[in-house]
Amino acid sequence: MIAAIREAVAERLGSCDGVVALRRRNGGVAPHLFQKGDELAEMELSPRYPLMTVVSRLHKAFPAIRLGVVARGCDERAYVEMAKRNQIDPTRLEIIGFACTAEEAQACYCREPSPKHPVAGTPPAPGPPNPLVAKYDSLPLEERRSFWKKQFSKCIKCYGCRNICPECFCEACAMEDMAWVEPGLLAPPFPTFHLIRAMHMASRCVACRECEHTCPAYIPLTVLYDLMRRDIADLLGYIPGADIEAQQPLSLSLEQAPLKK
Amino acid sequence: MSVESGFDPKIVAFMCNWCTYAGADNAGVARMESPHNILAVRVMCSGRVSPEMVIRAFRSGADGVLVMGCHIGDCHYAAGNHRTAKRMPLLRNLLGYVGINPERMELAWVSAGEAPRFVEVTQAFTKKIRNLGPLAQEVTE
Ligand code: SF4
Ligand code: SF4
Ligand code: FES
């Protein structure tokens, strides 16, 4: 599979200024901007990394640059929501997509484990929903509360969940505003910190699960975000990451984006 | 009744300047009796009420939070309350997901001319919260 992707990257290096992908060097893997003449044998596909954030930074720093990017399904979904919010310029980006494996789709509970037009890999069957999300509605309030209190009490407020998230790019972050999140308190008092982030992810979260993979405290953050994704679909018929033409409904009027219930 | 149960709830009510706040004011001028539990926070539009403000109200000791504004179609800023109408149900669900009874938060449209409705809504909500008991029970127990 990686051979086909390297080939596609080599081709794009003719028409773009560079291609963003992962590179293995000195025993580690990190994002890299491949340019003409670079050794493509060093290119890697794993571990997953939110490469669209790198694309966004490059697009902002170099307003004329044309890029390619090697992307998974989640990267493409992240791109869709970022482009709508002016974080990436779609006219200056080409996606070289590849499908994840069935095992990866399972592990990520991924419903869409491939970009729309992969150049490599066969799109596997979608992963199952997170079992906790699947049975969530039947859990009594007390059980939910004791579960999340315990989970949130592990938080060391490292902001890793926010920093890794491709959809977190506001210059002024509500989670750093002393009016909403009191400084110096660990763990953050239930339920302030995490509810703010969960609310801000409504209509944005593309279920890439980077936040959950990165959390040093192993807090199952995407259980909440998956529930928000379900609600925004039920309430407003919006699926983050699905359609670049669909405007995000929370900032539209009720005529433009009516409530479904 | 508050004395009997030993619990007198604190309720933060966000009210938009143009409709609900005027409605509350009219209720006062007409000497109608609305619950003393309501702590009014006047905002220019219900669309100004961010989720952070509601969460902070709970964190600061509110047992219930009301978000009130103009009826749909009457918002002074045309579509300000359209955003409220979408955002608040999401926040309500989210409270439920972490185990805070979503009944502790309510969205209500009350116009300047609806002083009796203001009294009705605030009384009914206060009664509901009184029955639910203090939030501290849920958050810190
Ligand atoms: S990554 Fe985990 S520990 Fe760090 S701030 Fe987020 S929830 Fe807390
Ligand atoms: S899964 Fe986490 S990191 Fe990915 S978009 Fe959603 S909130 Fe952001
Ligand atoms: S001005 Fe009253 S809700 Fe907008």
Image (spheres, coloured by chain):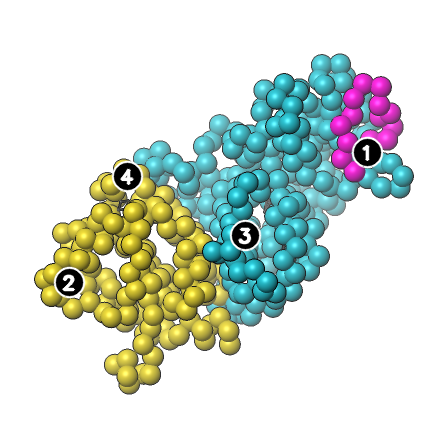
In whole angstroms, how far apart are the C-alphas of marks 4 and 1?
A: 51 Å
In whole angstroms, how far apart are the C-alphas of marks 2 and 4?
A: 26 Å
Amino acid bearing label 4: Tyr
Drawing shade for chain B: yellow
What is the quadrant of residue B82 in the picture?
top left
Write down the residue under mark 1: A23
In whole angstroms, how far apart are the C-alphas of marks 1 and 2?
A: 69 Å
Mark nearer the N terminus (2 vs 4): 2
State which mark lies toward you, 1 or 2: 2
Whether discs 1 and 2 lie on one chain: the answer is no
From this viewpoint, is residue A235 visible?
yes
Please tell me in which quarter of the rendered image ligand 1 is found.
Answer: bottom right
Circle 4 chain: B
Image quarter in which the N terminus of chain B is found: bottom left
Drawing shade for chain A: cyan
Please, what secondary structure does the residue beneath circle 4 have? loop
Ligand 3 within 8 angstroms of badge 4 C-beta: yes
Q: Which residues are magenta?
A: A30-44
Whether discs 4 and 3 lie on one chain: the answer is no
The crowd level at tag 2 (other Cα within 10 Å; few <14, some 14-19, many 20+) is some
Label drawn at residue B77? 4
Camera-nearest residue between A1 and A197: A197
What is the quadrant of residue B4 in the picture?
bottom left
Mark nearer the N terminus (3 vs 1): 1
Amino acid bearing label 3: Met
Magenta stretch holds residue A43: yes
Whether discs 4 and 1 lie on one chain: the answer is no
> Which residue sits furthest bottom?
B4
